[in-house]
Amino acid sequence: MQKWVAFRLSRQGRVVDLIRRVAEARDPGEHGHGVEVVVEAPRKKWWQALFNRDDTLAQARIVVTREGGEVRYPFDIQLVTAYGANAAHRLGTRQGWAVSNSAGMAFVIQKGTHRTGFEFEELTAGAVAALAKLRRKPQDRGWRARIDRSVKRS
């Protein structure tokens, strides 16, 4: 398993670097199903989370490569939060993005074309912004990200 990389909400460059590294390597992952970059929001203190549903894990799982290491639009981001499948619809819309509740899972999807190139900064900003909105007033410190090469999709 990869190590977690710490970053600040206000400085997301380390996450962009992780995504770019996976994409450039065209890494198919351990099982050939692709690689995800997992972004995790900091947890609130238990007394702050008591009435805000913020005491559980909040992750954005960014699908960077697909089967065989393919990198292409659309980029899917699975939201794993206390809101479950309803998380994506709590976010509202964002230019160039779509939200989905598919098979009981919440997704935010970055649309685009290969002609414009990949916008990894916008992909990162969208994933982190989604978690930040669901977390309600998150702290700047305590965010972390890692590469997950053990993805298995059915």
Image (spheres, rainbow, N blue to C red):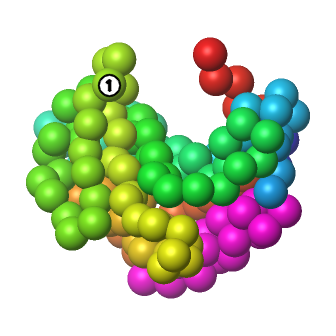
Q: With 138 as the anchor, is 114 left or right in this view?
A: right
**What span is in magenta?**
5-25
27 vs 83: above or below: below
Q: With 91 as the anchor, is 140 left or right in this view?
A: right
Task: Judge by depth and name the residue closer to the eye, 71 or 21.
Answer: 71
The quarter of the rendered structure image containing the C terminus is top right
17 vs 91: above or below: below
Residue located farthest toward the front when viewing the structure as drawn: 115
Can residue 26 be seen in the rendering of this structure?
yes
Can residue 44 be seen in the rendering of this structure?
no
Residue pictured at 87% horizontal, 34% vertical? 30
- Looking at the picture, how far across and down is residue 55, in whole percent? 34, 38
36 vs 5: above or below: above
Mark 1, residue position: 102
Task: Based on the picture, tell me whether residue 41 belongs to the magenta stretch.
Answer: no
The quarter of the rendered structure image containing the N terminus is top right
The kind of residue tagged 1 is Ser
- Looking at the picture, how far across and down is residue 114, in whole percent? 54, 69
